[in-house]
Image: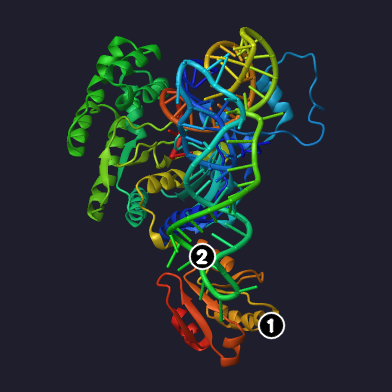
Amino acid sequence: MNYNVVKGTRDFLPEQMNKRNYIFTTIEKVYQLHGFSQIETPALENLSTLMGKYGEEGDRLIYKVLNSGNFLDKVELNQELDYKKLTNKISEKGLRYDLTVPFARFIVNNRNNITFPFKRYQIQPVWRADRPQKGRYREFYQCDADIIGSHSLLNEVELCEIIDEVFSLLGLKIELKINNRKILAAIAELIGKPDKIVDITIAIDKLDKIGYDKVIEELLERGLTNEDIEKINPILNLKGSIEDKILALKRLFINSEIGQKGISELEEVFNNVQILNLSLDLDFDITLARGLNYYTGAIFEVKCKDVTMGSIVGGGRYDNLTGIFGMPDVSGVGISFGADRIYDCLEELNLFPDQISASTTIIFVNFGAKESKQCLKYAKILRSKGIKTEIYPEEVKLQKQMKYANDKKIPFVALLGEKEIEEGVIVLKNMISGEQTSLTIEQITDLLYK
RNA sequence: GUAUGCGUAGCUCAGUUGGUUAGAGUAGUGGAUUGUGGUUCCAUUGGUCGUGGGUUCGAGUCCCAUCGCGUACCCCA
């Protein structure tokens, strides 16, 4: 009989947890360094909070939780069977799909307890009812940082800096792509079809994936005319340096207020980021769209340069996210590190440092009841100095106890038998060199205490 | 939702045009070694070949169905 974990979810072994925690603490350290405070929100949210925030596809991917008790109470059978209507009646809660929307809800609910601009970070799992594949899970961790209640573009710059610091610490070579939703809006405006912005962005987002011709095809399918495509053609063929692209767009959007705004925002971010002299590769990517409906300004995406993998960071500015919860005109900008994808990148490139195990430093061999009593005393002394210490619980063959220490990569084994107790010493075995020396507890404490 | 590949021991896999009792490595257990792991040697546990049906004298192998897993598309961290 097989009791598998749910598809797209995973168990984590101790060694994997050490590696995961290495990623989490690295990100957390950088967030704290920039003055972000941690919050948490519940795994479950009301569906009224979640639904309609991520587009039609997003709604489909939200895990809905069945009402408890007799969930059929409100259902009149023999009525028309529409699964969406039925869902509304039998489910009113769901697992969170990301951390941004619950955060917006959090802001609105807690506005009186928050000082703005509010810099928060949040590291928690999210769930998506998606088909798993490489780098895609149904349960995965997002590591979000947002600055809310500030329009300043310095915030965008700070987020770029954070991205650079995190990946420098992790040793990953990355490319940071930036775009601005206002520029995308200006494109839709250019052809006089502002309502087509989503269709256009979805299509041109695929430019590097399916190629120019297929994008044109898709644009036509999505209701654009050949005339429209001619107008936006210069955008699809945008090439050269960041400065070249900006210059070209400035000309194109000469009569577009929103286009001009988008470009000036972009320029300001780029100029300030350049002052920081970051080690990441920065690119202005007009095709970068992001599916999320709520971005209004900057859009960020990070890709690992050495691994084929979806984006490992996503983010952007949203001017009115809290508006849907009844608190308008609060602008925020944020990013989200995908910890699980970063894990897969580091693993594939063998970039995890060797010394990240959180394992025991020293273990006392168990020679029996009498000897164990002395071990208890010594272990307490070591632990009081912060040295990770354990005592093997069973009086079994020494061979087995040594194997335990070896398997758990414990660097020191303390042997405390009848003879040693008489002499008041401990035999300390270095498991890496194999050397053994007789030492007092004070000498061992000094040796292992850093 | 669409397309496609794979299911043999706890894990990684071999298994010939269908042919007797399905193998190896590794992990586990016991021993060589009752105070010494990682290296070595010996022994040993462990399988309804994912499940159900069919073809056949005979199926791990061929066919059908079903379940599970992976990959790609859509979308996304």
Disc 1 marks which residue?
Answer: A370
Which amino acid is tagged 1? Lys
> In this image, A346 relative to A175: left or right?
right
Q: Is residue B77 above or below residue A393?
A: above
Instruction: Tell me which colouring the rendered structure shows.
Output: rainbow
For mark 1, give the secondary structure: helix
The image shows residue A303 at horizontal and vertical percentages of 34, 40
Q: Residue furthest bottom?
A: A423
The image shows residue A49 at horizontal and vertical percentages of 61, 37
Q: Chain of mark 2?
A: A
Disc 2 marks which residue?
Answer: A359
Residue in front for this viewpoint, B13 or A116: B13
N-terminal of the two: label 2 or label 1? 2
Please determine if labels 2 and 1 lie on a single subunit: yes
Residue in front for this viewpoint, B9 or B43: B43
Residue A8 visible? The answer is yes
The image shows residue A315 at horizontal and vertical percentages of 41, 42
Which of the two discs, 2 and 1, sits closer to the camera? 1
> In this image, A145 relative to A188: left or right?
right
Circle 1 packing at 10 Å, graded few (<14), some (14-19), many (20+), is few
Q: Chain of mark 1?
A: A
Q: Quadrant of residue A232?
A: top left
Residue at figure coordinates x 59%, y 74% from the top left:
A365
Which amino acid is tagged 2? Ser
Q: Is residue A183 above or below residue A14?
A: above
For mark 2, give the secondary structure: loop
